[in-house]
Structure formats: C-alpha cells, structure tokens
Image (tube, rainbow, N blue to C red):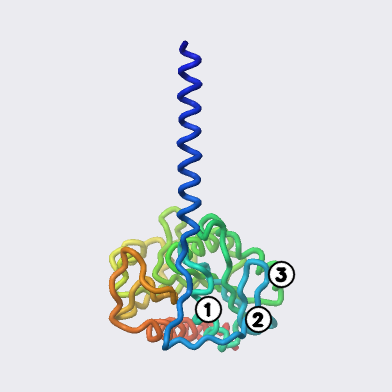
C-alpha cells in the first residue's frame, strides 16, 4: 500500500513540475515587441545572421554586443544599434534562449568566434540582459575590453569588483525596476573605475523602444531623447578608450 501511495505522490509531483514548466514557457513567449515611435527613424541598414541582428561595418576593429532585457525582442534595440554603428563600430543584438539572456549568457561566443578581426569587444545589455553581460564578462575577462550596463547591475555572485575592466553604467531616475537605489546598492560588485551616469527623467522601458512595462515608472522625457542620451554616453566612453578610431 505504501509503494502505491509513493508512486501516486511521485506521479502527482511530476505532473505539477511539467505544468509549471509549460506555464513558464508560455509566459516567456509573451514578449515586448518593438513599436513605431514618431521620433525614431529606423533604416534598413542591418543584416540577419542566424540569431543575430547586425549593424555597422563588419570589418570594424570594435564590436558591441547588446543582450536584450527579459522577454524583450532584439528589434526593440535597433535604434541604439543603428546609431552606435555610425561611430565605426560593429553592433549586434542576439535572440536568446526563451527570451532570457541569463539562460544564454555565453551567446556572445558565437559572434566573437566568427568576427576574429574585431580587436575590442564591448559587451552590454539592458536589465536582465545587462546582468547576463556581466556574467559573461566575469567568466571571459580575456575576451572583452568593456562592459555597458543599461538599467542594470552586476549580481553579487558575479562580482567584477577585483577587476580593472572598464564599465559604463547608465541608469534612469524614473526606473521602477532597476531603481536608483538598486544601482547604488550593487556598486560594490563593479570595479572602482566604473563610470555611472543617471538619465534625468529616463525610465526602464525607454532603454529600448517597446512601449510601457509593468512595474516601471512613467518617463519624464521622450523615448527619442533617452535613446540619444544613451548613444551619446556610450560613444564618448568608447572614444575615451580609443575604441572608435
């Protein structure tokens, strides 16, 4: 009788796990898609290679890899990539496993292995994508020359505090998810030389172009203004390190 009971419990447990996994999978496929914005002008100057959207000169010596935020489609970062590519950089955004970059944080290896002419790799990302980028940087310090965090921060178990890796952290004063308090609390996990810039009036969702996001605060500036500030800060930071010459 006890064996029959144990089998029933085990079977019930397996059913619960399968239902939970199925529910998570369905939820992960409900994504934030890129939207049209009257202030954003997109051009068709990109190519698609497998799971990657690529902008800019493929012969450039500097490459930027941007991991998307959780459940955000890579096309939502097209304007950032398009504008950064104007500064003589190859810029690429991947489609990641189940739309969560942390499940696929080593995705950057694909591009780095293929474009071996690139000498300076900057890896970055938005929100959870930034956390995944920090994970990659922590485990591949010899592969990357810089890290960009957009409304994001490094986790305690992926600390970069003991490294000298150049890091640029861009946050928003109205970010309701990666709040200014969270950015401050996670500073100990980044190098002492990390640079921080807070966009006044910027929120979480406007690090991409995909509309509103649950839990976020309302931005006090336009998405175009926030995007242009992000581009300007990354370009100046890259110039500072002689990566765009």
- Whether tag 3 and tag 1 are in contact, CB under 8 A, the answer is no
Q: Is residue 130 visible?
A: no
**In front: label 1 or label 2:** 1
For mark 1, give the secondary structure: helix
Q: Is residue 217 visible?
A: yes
> Quarter of the image holding residue 141?
bottom right
Disc 1 versus disc 2: distance between alpha carbons? 21 Å
For residue 127, which quarter of the picture?
Answer: bottom left
Residue for badge 2: 61
Residue 52: where, in percent of width, then height? Answer: 62, 70
Q: Which mark is residue 114?
A: 3
Q: Is 241 situated above or below 162?
A: below
Kindly indicate whether the residue at mark 3 contacts the one at mark 2 (C-beta within 8 angstroms): no
- Which percent across, then down, holds residue 55? 61, 81
Depicted 31 relative to depicted 223: above or below: above
- Give the alpha-carbon distance from disc 2 to disc 3, as whole Å: 13 Å
Where does the image place residue 128, in percent across and percent down from the top left?
45, 62
* N-terminal label among 1 and 2: 2
Residue drawn where x is 47% and y is 56% of the image: 158
Crowding at mark 2 (Cα within 10 Å: few <14, some 14-19, many 20+): some
Q: Which mark is residue 78?
A: 1
Q: In the rendered view, does 106 fall on the left or right side of 237? A: right
**Which numbered disc flags the more N-terminal residue, 2 or 3?**
2
- Residue at image position (39%, 70%) is 151
Identity of the residue drawn at 46% across and 83% down: 231
Q: In front here: 236 or 207? A: 207
Q: What is the CA distance from the residue labelled 3 to the residue labelled 1?
A: 21 Å
Q: Which of labels 2 and 3 is toward the front?
A: 3
Q: Could you tell whether 208 is left or right of 47 in the image?
A: left
């Amino acid at each position: 009788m006890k064996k029959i009971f144990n089998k029933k419990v085990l079977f019930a447990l397996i059913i619960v796990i399968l239902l939970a996994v199925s529910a998570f999978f369905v939820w992960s496929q409900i994504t934030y898609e890129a939207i049209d914005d009257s202030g954003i002008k997109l051009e068709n100057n990109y190519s698609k290679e497998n799971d990657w959207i690529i902008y800019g000169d493929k012969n450039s010596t500097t490459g930027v890899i941007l991991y998307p935020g959780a459940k955000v489609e890579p096309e939502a970062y097209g304007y950032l990539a398009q504008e950064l590519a104007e500064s003589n950089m190859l810029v690429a955004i991947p489609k990641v496993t189940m739309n969560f970059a942390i499940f696929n944080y080593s995705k950057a290896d694909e591009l780095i292995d293929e474009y071996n002419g690139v000498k300076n790799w900057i890896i970055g990302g938005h929100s959870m994508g930034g956390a995944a980028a920090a994970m990659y940087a922590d485990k591949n310090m010899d592969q990357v020359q810089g890290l960009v965090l957009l409304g994001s921060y490094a986790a305690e178990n992926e600390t970069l505090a003991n490294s000298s890796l150049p890091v640029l952290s861009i946050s928003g004063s109205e970010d309701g998810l990666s709040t200014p308090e969270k950015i401050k609390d996670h500073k100990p996990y980044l190098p002492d030389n990390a640079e921080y810039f807070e966009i006044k009036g910027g929120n979480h969702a406007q690090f991409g172009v995909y509309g509103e996001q649950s839990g976020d605060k309302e931005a006090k500036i336009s998405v175009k203004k926030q995007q242009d500030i992000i581009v300007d800060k990354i370009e100046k930071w890259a110039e500072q390190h002689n990566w765009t010459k």
